[in-house]
Amino acid sequence: MFTATRNTTMKAITQDSYGGPEQLRLVQRAVPQPADDEVLLKVAAAGLDRGTWHLMHGLPYIIRPAFGLRAPRQPIPGLDVAGTVVAMGADVTNLAVGDSVFGFAKGSFAEYAVADPSKLAPMPSGLEPAAAAALGVSGLTALGAVYDKAHVKAGQRVLITGASGGVGSYAVQLAADLGAEVTGVCSASKAEFVRSLGAARVLDYTAGPISAEQPFDVIMDIAGLTSVRQLRALLTETGTIVMVGGEGDNRWTSGFGRTVRAAVLSPFIKQKITMFLSSERSEDLVRLVELVERGAVTPQLDRVLPLAEAATAMELLEQGHIRGKIALTTDTSLD
């Protein structure tokens, strides 16, 4: 193993059982060692997303066989990461110690984390680590939904629910960049933020059911709060609904059951309903970098907090107070 660090311990956020932000604790842990096909990163920043929130709570219950029945199998949360390669396994040939990268890591809420090189890409030029750490999960989800599933084209009318959140803030920018006429759905307090991303119109979901004078060619349902029947009524006869996410009160399946039922319906109707799960491939991260570097999309950071305030960051995410994304930094000057 090639290494540029002599540190043996690190600060890390851990949780010993499923639950809310109060379960997150800052502790000293041993620096993890990369396997032969992995690298060790000195973490500069880590991003938060709804997936990390679900894993913190262990919800819905159907995920627990894969991630731990009674407690998280990976005690250090976090997936989104930006940092520097400080050690490499013997089989790694596509990266070098000192490379600045972003992407996905195992347990990024820490000063060091191991990562699979196939899930990393070079840091976008001119982007601060906290912004790069906010790109991975949400950026790739939006990219795949807009480009690969919805196939958004110039002139199309596109409705995006959850437009002010992590995925939504990227989706609005990407669809607008393609020349679509974007309508974003969010709360009234976040309307100007969504307009600043490129939305031509903004609808306040708290004001009543979503309505429109003309049907939409594409609906990207990120919030998951509107029934499939209502969404179909807003769609053209041959339009497309991409179900990106969805919350629900069912602790066993959350919004997953709704998404599957909708996808099963799709072959029997003229409208197309499809669901989307994000990739973690480096080639897709490179696609995202190209869009960032030409100015088509910019990470929207609501705030950056020190690693020690991970519980506070999760509370803000949980309460829906974030416009765009929130990130944690290991920069001790913010402590």
Image (cartoon, rainbow, N blue to C red):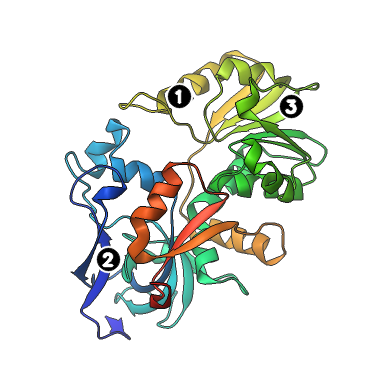
- Label 2 to label 3: alpha-carbon separation: 46 Å
Q: Crowding at label 1, few (<14), some or many (≥20) Cα neighbours within 10 Å?
A: some
User: Residue at position x 71%, y 39% from top?
Assistant: 152
Nearest the viewer among 228 and 328 is 328
Whether 269 is drawn above or below 6: the answer is above
Q: Residue furthest right?
A: 155
Q: What residue would you read off at disc 1?
A: 260
Q: Position of residue 325 (x, y in %)?
A: 53, 53
Question: Which secondary structure lies at badge 3?
Answer: strand
User: Residue at position x 16%, y 40% from top?
Assistant: 70
Q: What residue would you read off at disc 3?
A: 216
Q: Nearer the viewer, mark 1 or mark 2?
A: 2
Q: Is residue 281 visible?
A: yes
Mark sitting earlier along the chain (2/3): 2
Marks 1 and 3 in Cβ contact (< 8 Å): no
Question: Which secondary structure lies at badge 2?
Answer: strand
Q: Which mark is residue 12?
A: 2
- Label 1 to label 2: alpha-carbon separation: 36 Å
User: Residue at position x 48%, y 66% from top?
Assistant: 102
Whether 162 is drawn above or below 298: the answer is above
Three-letter code, disc 2: Ala
- 261 vs 147, left or right, is left
Q: Position of residue 78 (x, y in %)?
A: 36, 56
Q: Crowding at label 2, few (<14), some or many (≥20) Cα neighbours within 10 Å?
A: many
Q: Quadrant of residue 7?
A: bottom left
- 153 vs 272, left or right, is right
Question: Which secondary structure lies at badge 1?
Answer: helix
Three-letter code, disc 1: Val
